[in-house]
Amino acid sequence: MKALRASRMERCIGCHSCSLACARLVHKVLSWNKAGIRIASAGGLSTGFEARVCLACSPAPCAQACPTGAMAPRRDGGVMHKENLCIRCGKCAEACPVEAIFLDHEVNPYVCIHCGRCVAFCPHDCLELVDLPAKGGEAADD
Amino acid sequence: MIREFFRVMVVNLTTGKTNIVEIGGRSEFLGGCGLAALLFRKYGRVDADWDHPDQPLILTIGPLTGYYPLMSKTCCAFRSPYHNQYAESYAGGKSALSLRFADLDGLVVVGRAERLTALCVGSRRVETRDVEYMRGFDALQTGRVLRKIFPGSGRRSILRIGPAGENRSAFACINVDTYRHFGRLGGGTVMGAKNLKGICILGDRGFPLPEGKAYPKLYQHIFEQLTTTEMMAKYHGVGTAVNISPLNKLKSLPWKNLQQTSSPEADKISGETFADDTLLRNAACAGCPVGCIHVGFVREQFQANNQYLYRQVGYDYEPIFSCGGMLEVTDPGQVLRILDVIEKVGLDNMSAGVALAWCTEALDKGVITEAETLVRFNWGDADTYMKGVEFLGTPPNDFYRLLAQGTMKCARQYGGEDFACVLGQEMAGYATGEVFFVSEALGFRHAHLDAGGYSWDQKHEEREVEPALDFLVNDGRDRIVLNSMVGCLFSRGVYKDEELAAALDALGYGELNGKLQDIGQRIQCARWRLRLDMGYDPDKVKIPKRYTEITTWKGPLDVDYLDALRRGYAARIKAMGTDPRGEIDPAQYERKGK
């Protein structure tokens, strides 16, 4: 099972192409917020950039905090968001230790699904898809 | 598309009231510089000076902003303190995408706040804060404080001024998100006159995209052209500073207040030298994968016993020309130190460098003395030039107060007009020849970006007037179309007519296809009409003697050719400025009751 890693953020130029790609290709919106990965400067452009992206925790605090099972844990880490189960309480975002979940003004959560579609849009190769260690001894089969 | 009409926020700093206004005219003005001209006709005053509280500060984006790579610029329009006429300046950073995601095609600020104020706007927010305590804060410190006041890292843009804008230096810039600027013609001064220290734009909305595969496919195609071909390699690699060496070889690099057009010392401040010795990293405007912003690094020992500080300073070709070559400062680190002070004070770096170059020659010639300049400027002496920059931002005497209004205004009083390197405003870095000099001296923005006159000079040895003028007008119009979208001019090799048509079509603006040339012409005429109405007379433009004394790769400058171009271009400008296509009746585009 794969996970997206922002492994080389020291190369980031702050173009937001990754966020725009996620919003465009995964969520079908024009946005730099409604995306599983978002870029912020660490305190003005002179301090470089950081990526706010799901670290594929296992167990995932957001899934544990979700009262309805909308944040469903993936087998090897991370979550899938099931929109039809979501009551938009925002508990998932509160629980995330790295601010990886964005809530829009209607409290819809946006979280990385580790599909890797943003990777090709990074001009400096900051992002990569890596294999997560398989849990429970089963082979990764995503 | 999000909507057919323009959605504009109008903030009145005098009354504290804000309105959302819906305005038609997309198929006549597109957006960007076209929309800005329409908005100035609606909110601006031809019969009042630049600093009248009624005069608007206008920010606009275009139909393609945020939807495609490099559609990442914002047009800023205002009545300029420099010449008291209509002016435009462009910047990127995160400003364009922030406006898009704030759901604003335009932001218009009118009125004047009683005390120093910061404004924050977003899709669900408008707020002003008293920031009188920030009076005199430099632009970097101002940015740091505004970031704390208006949280939203990564999805906001912060525009602000330094002391130069507060003190009404006529070439104060608006700093945008660190390293980017609405640089020329005094946008920062307009903010200062409004008691507006900063504007935070929160880009906090998203929009549905067109259904189907056409749009993402086209995006991918354009993205690949920009990132996998050699087309943008120049901007990404060495950056615009790469121009130093070829212009020096062509004897087209203004040097030492244009006493020379080349120097054996130029290699020391070439783009390659800057990259090798100072380049820390690249950065990008939001929505642009090219990353043309080059950030240099300079380390300074400030105390004994190994106590150092470091500065990160953006550089490009133009600042190296103005604060390197023009001042004969040939150490990249020293150039960066001057630029760092300019960044903090909040001045346009081209204007500041060129003004100080004139000062140095005027001192050498005895036209002015240290009684005026307070310090002795010497070619190559960066520390004194840094002091001079501070004087331009916070003038300590009448001389600097006048110099900060423009080098030529100062030269008219003190002497030295012949060697004031002013082409409408302090020159840009191209001593390429007659076509560029006329293009900048008479051009709409008095910028090297109005049209590619510098390029024409480098490619054409023949001295024909009409083809050169045709080029200036037509290339200017093409740039106006891109400036209405609003795309970065570096992308003009990608966004040809066909690509623009496809890009518009994929978003539902297909009806604009085939009309872009006409629309460009209308906007071109409308902009010129605004300037003529505010007193611009292109026949009265003088090109200083210094420009007739230089030698380029083509040999000595041809004064007759220069004059023929000047007269011909003035006639073309007047024709465009009186063309009925440029008449705008804002009432025609109101959407009352809708």
Image (cartoon, coloured by chain):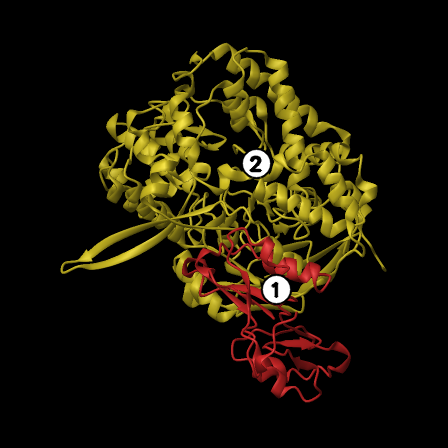
Chain letter for red, please. A
Q: Is residue B240 above or below residue B551?
A: below
Q: x and y percent of residue B152 in the render?
A: 55, 68
Q: x and y percent of residue B583 in the render?
A: 75, 36
Which dot, 2 or 1, sits closer to the camera?
2
Q: Amino acid at mark 2?
A: Met
Instruction: Residue at the far right: name it.
Output: B593
Are labels 2 and 1 assigned to the same chain?
yes
Judged left or right of residue B386, residue A84 is: right
Q: x and y percent of residue B450 in the render?
A: 58, 32
- CB under 8 Å between callouts 2 and 1? no
**Is the residue marked by circle 2 packed among few (<14), some (14-19), or many (20+) residues within 10 Å?**
some
Q: For mark 2, what is the residue?
A: B231
**Depth check: B279 or B330 in front?**
B279
Q: CA distance from mark 2 to mark 1?
A: 36 Å
Residue at mark 1: chain = B
Residue A30 visible to an observer of this rendering: no
Q: For mark 1, what is the residue?
A: B121
Q: Amino acid at mark 1?
A: Val
Q: Is residue B441 above or below residue B194?
A: above
Residue at mark 2: chain = B
Chain letter for yellow, please. B
Q: How many marks?
A: 2
Which disc is residue B76 wearing?
Answer: none
Q: Helix or strand or loop: what does disc 1 sit on?
A: strand
**Which residue corresponds to the image point at 59% horizontal and 77% vertical from the top-left?**
A76
Q: Is residue B572 above or below residue B39?
A: above
Q: x and y percent of residue B566 in the render?
A: 55, 19
